[in-house]
């Protein structure tokens, strides 16, 4: 079988993985860090620094230069003529604004010139807002009020109007520079922009990344006329088609054949967002598996059995590239909160872990919502945790109990906030730094009443792209590819050790605590 290539254009780097589905191996991997390899873009962390008012942009030409460098590097590591299937993903929400020259330029790329030089004249906006941009609070409110409130935006698009989402970003551009907006003939996401470049034709946006725009209707998977009208005039004509994540959209452009030795006819599958791609790359694209990533913030995502939006407007629904939809929910108070409680008692991580053996599940009724900074799931502006229980506990005099309460509070809250997804998790894939900790993993297994497995996830976004490409082009089954490429770490399974009802009263107490502060 020929090779499959997955590309991941993320915030700080562009990386790639080439897989051989016959042998179940990664043939080659490469990465180009924007800051290190392209210092002349003055974006050491992948975005232009020093902007005010929450504006965070990046230069889209940097992403193109990185793609050229990446394929040059990759060509030294493996035979690119063996690649017959290509897909990939981009950081979600970021947008590229192109004028009428785009359609011709992308179709006639010249292999003797860099991509960036050829696309530069096509930019109707020099820089691209990315997901870190939070400058559109006003536009979010305007969009929500135009369609009848945030609950309607959420029901239609799978998320309330969110600052980083593309629709509010487009609205801000239209308001601030109407002339440039009028000159814009096409607005692409990072994913569909790079996909267009690779196949030398204007490519569609998939339902996974498209749902990160506040413009796509998650029931019909079509652009929503009301949301479009609320965002900016004549917007529909500026957006590409929408397609399901399994769609083949073209063959590799002659540019890459001539320059890097790809085979003419290598097929390109629509790109998606990094989170939907990661769902596939972790082997979790079928309902029943949940991914919890423990990082600075904790993230919860899963394939959903049916398309529903969060009635509380905290979570997001995106298209699942494997069909249907997926959820994604962020919990701001993740690792930093665990660390803050640990540090309050001058514990090290070993003492932190021992605290769980010194205390019992459900913590004798001592509970905590460990929100050291404003939380978004649920939305609550707190600067310090909320505690309930014995006097010594609420006065932070019981170290072990506080540590258990912190972690139990985080995951019982996560369970409460993810109930709207109607999931029945059989297995939870735990990733991220803190996932190695058995005591934390045990709390997750107990609270969710599901077995927990640890996944080593470096590169799940690119891998997801390569797996999706192999699925659509070679007909390889995604489940079988998951078994080949996404095996959990051996001996890492943790089974629930308590009854399902153990955390019922913890949940009730946390809800009660919240209700007094919401
Ligand atoms: C998701 C989000 C980020 C970006 C960048 O909504 O904003 O995860 O996709 O990785």
Image (cartoon, rainbow, N blue to C red):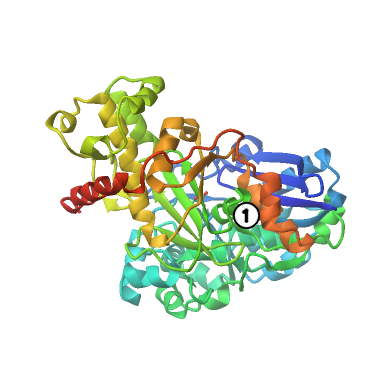
Residue sitting at 42 percent across and 38 percent down?
Answer: 296
Mark 1 highlights which residue?
A: 89
Residue 129, horizontal then vertical, whole percent: 49, 55
Q: Quadrant of residue 388?
A: top left
Residue 266, horizontal then vertical, whole percent: 82, 60
Residue sitting at 21 percent across and 39 percent down?
Answer: 365
Q: With respect to residue 73, does 187 lie above or below?
A: below
Q: With respect to residue 391, does 330 lie above or below?
A: below
Q: Is residue 32 visible?
A: yes
Considering depth in this image, is 368 or 193 the residue closer to the camera?
A: 368
Residue sitting at 39 percent across and 25 percent down?
Answer: 353
Q: With respect to residue 512, does 125 lie above or below?
A: below
Considering depth in this image, is 105 or 412 the residue closer to the camera?
A: 412
Q: Is residue 252 visible?
A: no
518 on left or right of 444: left
Image quarter (top left, top right, bottom left or bottom right) of the C terminus = bottom left
Classify mark 1: helix, strand or loop: strand
Residue sitting at 52 percent across and 67 percent down?
Answer: 180
Residue 130, horizontal then vertical, whole percent: 50, 53
């Amino acid at each position: 079988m020929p090779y499959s290539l997955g590309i991941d254009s993320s915030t700080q780097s562009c990386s790639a993985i080439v897989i051989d589905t016959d042998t179940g191996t990664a043939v080659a991997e490469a990465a180009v860090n924007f800051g290190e390899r392209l210092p002349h873009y003055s974006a050491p962390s992948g975005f232009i620094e020093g902007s005010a008012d929450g504006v965070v942009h990046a230069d889209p030409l940097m992403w193109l230069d990185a793609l050229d460098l990446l394929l040059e590097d990759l060509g030294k590591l493996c035979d690119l003529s063996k690649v017959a299937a290509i897909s990939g993903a981009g950081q979600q929400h970021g947008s590229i604004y192109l004028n009428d020259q785009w359609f011709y330029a992308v179709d006639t790329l010249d292999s003797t010139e860099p991509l960036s030089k050829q696309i530069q004249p096509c930019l109707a906006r020099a820089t691209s807002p990315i997901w870190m941009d939070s400058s559109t609070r006003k536009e979010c409110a305007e969009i929500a009020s135009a369609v009848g409130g945030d609950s309607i935006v959420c029901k239609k698009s799978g998320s309330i109007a969110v600052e980083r989402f593309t629709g509010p970003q487009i609205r801000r551009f239209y308001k601030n520079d109407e002339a440039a907006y009028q000159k814009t003939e096409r607005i692409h996401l990072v994913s569909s922009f790079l996909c267009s470049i690779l196949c030398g034709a204007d490519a569609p946006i998939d339902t996974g990344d498209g749902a990160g725009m506040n413009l796509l209707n998650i029931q019909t998977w079509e652009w929503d006329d009301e949301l479009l009208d609320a965002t900016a005039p004549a917007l529909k004509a500026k957006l590409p088609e929408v397609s399901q994540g399994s769609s083949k959209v073209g063959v590799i452009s002659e540019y890459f054949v001539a320059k890097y030795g790809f085979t003419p006819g290598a097929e390109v599958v629509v790109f998606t967002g990094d989170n939907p791609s990661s769902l596939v790359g972790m082997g979790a694209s079928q309902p029943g598996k949940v991914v919890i990533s423990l990082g600075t913030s904790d993230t919860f995502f899963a394939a959903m059995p049916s398309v529903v939006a969060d009635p509380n407007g905290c979570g997001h629904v995106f298209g699942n590239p494997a069909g249907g939809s997926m959820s994604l929910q962020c919990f701001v108070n993740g690792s930093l909160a665990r660390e803050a409680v640990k540090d309050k008692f001058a514990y090290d991580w070993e003492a932190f872990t021992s605290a769980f053996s010194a205390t019992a599940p459900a913590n004798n009724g001592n509970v905590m919502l460990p929100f050291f900074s404003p939380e978004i799931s649920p939305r609550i502006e707190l600067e310090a945790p909320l505690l309930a229980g014995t006097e010594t506990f609420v006065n932070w005099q019981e170290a072990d109990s506080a540590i258990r309460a912190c972690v139990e509070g985080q995951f019982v809250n996560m369970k409460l906030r993810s109930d709207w997804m109607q999931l029945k998790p059989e297995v939870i894939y735990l990733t991220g730094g803190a996932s190695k900790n058995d005591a934390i993993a045990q709390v997750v297994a107990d609270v969710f009443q599901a077995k927990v497995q640890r996944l080593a996830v470096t590169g799940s976004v690119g891998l997801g792209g390569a797996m999706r490409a192999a699925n659509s082009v070679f007909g390889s089954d995604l489940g079988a590819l998951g078994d080949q490429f996404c095996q959990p770490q051996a001996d890492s399974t943790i089974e629930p050790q308590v009854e399902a009802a153990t955390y019922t009263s913890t949940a009730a107490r946390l809800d009660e605590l919240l209700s007094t502060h919401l």
